[in-house]
Image: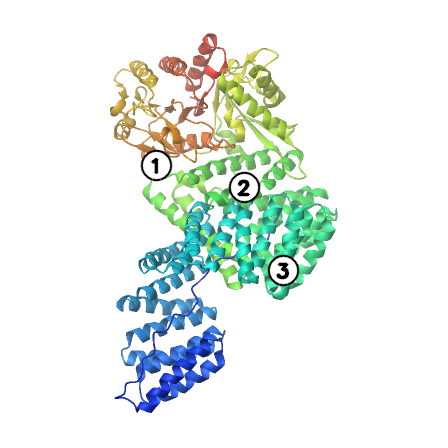
């Protein structure tokens, strides 16, 4: 497992002290002409000295001016001069000295009721406390200053203060609050046409969105900042925006694009002589090349970054780059060279007090020792890393190190220790995963894929099949919970929804804090993270206890295997194939679990993951095109891998029902069309088949309604959304159920569906559904929506439809459940969303089917339902009758039943 120290340049608080207004000159009535002329002369002198960077002479000159205005008893000017002196001290890094002068100015400004002088002083006190690292004190003064800026109608001062308050919340892990203030500042900068400040604020907003896992939003703001900074020739902000854009691209897995942006930023840093920015960008370029597996280029840029950081004496940056170089050498199989750099980084990490970085370096040293076949030394380094990571509250890092320790114990044949460490790692990842945003989730799953695969494989090898399935089942459930978060699915109970929304907000804050800890360690931040984690976990447990219907969204504990098996219906055999592939140092296999109410068996079969993936893709293409007969050979090969190894177990139970839990790309193929080449029978010819999203101990109540159907079709009878064939389908189906009128065209509204749905056990929607994350441009439909005559309904709101009496929801239109990504999560995810909304089962199509075939299958299915058959048997018989007419699986196999088969 890799743990990388990454440097990213971001734009923080507006710490540039506010410009002091023109000096208030003593009037001739107040002082002799000679003194007035002397003050004017000294002011010009002090200003010139400041412009020339002569800070100490400038302070001495301002002190002379202060002495004269005090003799004249000109209190308003005294406030201004005191602010000038304090500002110079703040600029040269002496905020404590600056505070002495600001604190003198504040009571005088209040005494003479100089509101502008007062607000200027309050703001400068805040800036000084910010430089001292006392951000809470700074916030107190910013909050006092804000209403006064508004009172004196100084929009620029107001915007600067709003930005500084936003930065406080950004730096203390409260991104929502930060955005609130940044979004107030932004329109003011636009109003006063302060384009450079506008660009800086846009960049800050981009950074916040990136920190809470919203890369698309981050890019939007970075991309707005970039042209503005170019327009006003603010090269610093331009480089920061480019680096931010590159960083987002790096994080979302687009290193090529990241490199383009980093290269542009690099040229600006070099042009302006900003060595710190140059080193940061060179470091990030090295990371991007490492991600592209171009180790030579990665090391070249990391070495350049290291050289600069050594020259400018940037010790923390130097340690980070050394650690990254160590990791790069480790990745190309040179652990000895890796150790050289890591050993150089470690004492620097310790000397600068970067405990998080120290733990990362020790963890990577363990990886190097492990690659050198020195597991005991590896474990020593891992244990040191683990102790630090637990102390500082680095939970992601703790999970990484526990996994590495588990693999090390496995390699020295200590399976008990290996299993304990791997399980502890997964428990942490499950706790964290529930709170991740979409982009972070994808990155997180990629980074943590090894652990569950290694654990499941090891448990099976140790004859602990029950324990292995417990972990498989919770992983399957968490996948589904992830999908509901991905589309932001709602729950019916408003109190539960409110609790979930509050929990999500706290989780975003926790993510932001973790990101800051990675960027820069501090004891205070570490303590804050531990407290936040405890609160988030406590709140999750409370929600699960108070609202059992949403407990799966927070599931981190294993379900008792006896309870899981007890939830399986009598006469049912459950099959779940699990791919254990593409994990380093774990043999590539597929584990096939076979469960009944009373038993659990598992068998591992060695496979080539690349060839297996090709086989699934090829089979899907063959049966979804209807143009080739090659599907028989391909389906036969898949039957030999997925069914034949456990066929004796299946046959021994003489099942009345075969339930499949498909994961990954296996969700894209209908198992009923797998062909037994020995008997020339499809699997559907042997058993009724349904699909389960997971095994759940929570049962759905049976519908009290026995008969009747609500059928809607072709709600928008015009291109591109016209479905003319669905009208006959809906009419024919409705005729089978007396008292069930069809709703077609402009009568097929969402309001009609909501009103009528509670009256019918069967709901049939012959309408378009778009479940592709980027939307369906050809249909002019948004992502995750169902088409009605009056609106596009977001399935995230499915819980609000009132489906508690629904035995079956059928989605029969051509665009339903089409492939949206390589994981197939949208197929089981859609079913899971509607299951949670109250539907006992969902029927959907895996690919587009012509209208006549759909109509024939659906009519036959509902006729069988009227004969008293179970849903699974009714669909099986409908498919068997279709096979006689159209043997190719293209016509009869795409509709699958997910959920309760009864």
Query: Could you say where residue 287 lies in the image, as x and y percent from the top left?
Result: 60, 50
Which numbered dot is residue 797?
A: 1
Which numbered dot is residue 121?
A: none
Query: Could you say where residue 808 lies in the image, as x and y percent from the top left?
Result: 37, 24
Which numbered dot is residue 319?
A: 3
Asked if 295 appears above or below 269 in the picture, the reply is above
Q: Nearer the viewer, mark 2 or mark 3?
A: 3
Q: Nearer the viewer, residue 69 or 546?
A: 69
Q: Nearer the viewer, residue 866 or 317?
A: 317
Structure colour scheme: rainbow
Report how far apart the C-alphas of labels 2 and 1 lie in the structure.
26 Å
Callout 3 touching callout 1 (CB < 8 Å): no
Query: Could you say where residue 4 lies in the image, as x and y percent from the top left?
Result: 60, 51
Query: Could you say where residue 848 lies in the image, as x and y percent from the top left?
Result: 43, 21
Report how far apart the C-alphas of labels 2 and 3 lie in the structure.
28 Å
Tell me the quarter of the picture where residue 761 sits: top left
Q: Earlier in the sequence, mark 3 or mark 1?
A: 3
Query: Can residue 5 be seen by looking at this rendering?
Result: no
Q: Residue furthest top?
A: 884
Crowding around mark 2 (Cα neighbors within 10 Å: few <14, some 14 to 19, many 20+) is few
- The quadrant of the picture occupied by the C terminus is top left
Q: Residue at x 49, y 50 (%)?
A: 245
Which numbered dot is residue 445?
A: 2
Q: Classify mark 3: helix, strand or loop.
A: helix
Q: Classify mark 2: helix, strand or loop.
A: helix
């Amino acid at each position: 497992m890799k743990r990388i120290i990454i440097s990213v340049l971001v734009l923080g608080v507006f710490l540039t002290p506010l410009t002091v207004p023109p000096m208030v000159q003593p009037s001739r009535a107040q002082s002799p002409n000679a003194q007035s002329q002397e003050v004017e002369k000294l002011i010009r002198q002090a200003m010139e000295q400041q412009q020339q960077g002569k800070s100490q002479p400038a302070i001495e000159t301002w002190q002379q001016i202060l002495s004269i205005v005090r003799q004249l008893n000109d209190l308003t000017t005294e406030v201004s001069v005191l602010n000038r002196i304090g500002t110079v001290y703040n600029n040269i890094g002496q905020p404590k000295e600056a505070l002495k002068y600001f604190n003198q100015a504040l009571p005088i400004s209040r005494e003479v009721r100089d509101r502008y002088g007062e607000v200027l002083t309050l703001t400068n006190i805040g800036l000084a406390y910010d430089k001292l690292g006392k951000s809470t004190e700074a916030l107190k003064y910013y909050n006092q200053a804000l209403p006064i800026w508004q009172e004196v109608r100084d929009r620029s001062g107001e915007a600067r203060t709003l930005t500084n308050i936003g930065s406080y919340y950004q730096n203390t892990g409260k991104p929502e609050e930060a955005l609130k203030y940044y979004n107030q500042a932004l329109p003011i900068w636009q109003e006063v046409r302060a384009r450079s400040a506008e660009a800086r604020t846009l960049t800050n907003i981009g950074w916040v969105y990136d920190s809470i896992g919203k890369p698309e939003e981050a890019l939007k703001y970075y991309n707005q900042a970039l042209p503005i900074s170019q327009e006003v020739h603010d090269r610093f902000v331009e480089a920061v925006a480019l680096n931010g854009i590159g960083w987002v691209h790096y994080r979302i897995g687009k290193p090529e694009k990241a490199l383009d942006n980093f290269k542009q930023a690099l040229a600006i840093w070099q042009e302006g002589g900003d060595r710190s920015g140059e080193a940061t960008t060179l470091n990030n370029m090295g990371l991007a090349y490492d991600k592209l597996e171009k180790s030579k280029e990665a090391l070249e840029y990391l070495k350049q970054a290291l050289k600069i950081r050594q020259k400018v004496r940037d010790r923390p940056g130097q340690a980070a780059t050394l650690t990254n170089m160590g990791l790069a050498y480790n990745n190309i199989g040179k652990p000895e060279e890796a150790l050289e750099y890591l050993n150089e980084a470690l004492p620097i990490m310790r000397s600068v007090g970067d405990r998080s970085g120290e733990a990362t370096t020790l963890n990577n040293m363990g990886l190097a020792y492990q690659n050198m076949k020195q597991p005991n030394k590896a474990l020593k380094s891992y244990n040191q890393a683990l102790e630090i990571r637990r102390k500082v509250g680095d939970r992601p890092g703790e999970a990484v190190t526990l996994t590495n320790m588990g693999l090390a114990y496995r390699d020295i044949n200590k399976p008990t220790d290996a299993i304990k460490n791997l399980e502890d790692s997964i428990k942490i990842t499950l706790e964290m995963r529930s709170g991740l945003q979409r982009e972070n989730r994808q990155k997180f799953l990629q980074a943590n894929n090894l652990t569950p695969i290694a654990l499941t494989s090891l448990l099976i090898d140790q004859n602990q099949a029950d324990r292995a399935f417990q972990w498989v089942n919770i992983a399957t459930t968490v996948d589904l919970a992830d999908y509901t978060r991905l589309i932001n699915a709602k729950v019916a109970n408003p109190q539960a929804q409110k609790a979930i929304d509050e929990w999500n907000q706290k989780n975003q804050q926790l993510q932001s804090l973790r990101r800051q800890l990675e960027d820069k360690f501090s004891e205070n931040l570490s303590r804050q993270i531990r407290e936040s984690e405890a609160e988030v976990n406590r709140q999750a447990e409370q929600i699960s206890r108070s609202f059992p219907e949403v407990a799966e969204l927070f599931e981190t504990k294993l379900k008792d295997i006896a309870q899981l098996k007890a939830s399986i219906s009598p006469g049912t055999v459950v099959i779940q194939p699990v791919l254990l592939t593409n994990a380093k140092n774990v043999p590539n296999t597929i584990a096939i679990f076979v469960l009944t109410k009373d038993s659990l068996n598992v068998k591992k079969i060695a496979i080539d993951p690349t060839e297996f993936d090709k086989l699934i893709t090829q089979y899907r293409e063959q049966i979804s095109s209807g143009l080739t007969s090659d599907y028989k050979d391909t389906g036969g090969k898949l039957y030999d891998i997925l069914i034949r190894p456990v066929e004796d177990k299946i046959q021994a139970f003489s099942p009345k029902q075969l339930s499949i839990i498909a994961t990954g790309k296996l969700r894209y193929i209908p198992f009923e069309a797998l062909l037994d080449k020995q008997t020339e029978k499809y699997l559907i010819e042997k058993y009724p088949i349904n699909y389960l999203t997971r095994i759940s101990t929570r049962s759905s109540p049976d519908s009290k309604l026995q008969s009747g159907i609500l059928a809607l079709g072709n709600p928008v009878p015009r291109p591109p959304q016209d479905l003319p064939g669905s009208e006959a389908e809906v009419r024919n189906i409705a005729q089978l159920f007396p008292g069930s009128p069809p709703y077609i065209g402009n009568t097929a509204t969402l309001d009609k569906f909501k009103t009528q749905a509670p009256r019918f056990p069967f709901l049939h929607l012959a309408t378009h559904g778009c479940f592709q994350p980027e939307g369906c441009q050809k249909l002019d439909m948004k992502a995750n929506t169902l088409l009605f005559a009056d609106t596009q309904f977001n399935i995230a709101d499915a819980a609000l439809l009132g489906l508690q009496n629904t035995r079956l929801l059928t989605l029969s239109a051509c665009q339903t459940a089409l492939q949206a990504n390589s994981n197939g999560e949208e197929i089981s995810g859609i079913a899971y969303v509607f299951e949670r909304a109250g539907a006992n089962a969902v029927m959907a199509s895996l690919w587009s089917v012509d209208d006549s075939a759909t109509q024939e299958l659906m009519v036959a299915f509902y006729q069988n339902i009227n004969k008293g058959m179970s849903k699974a048997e009714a669909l099986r018989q409908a498919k068997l009758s279709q096979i006689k007419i159209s043997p190719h699986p293209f016509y009869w196999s795409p509709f699958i039943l997910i959920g309760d088969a009864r």
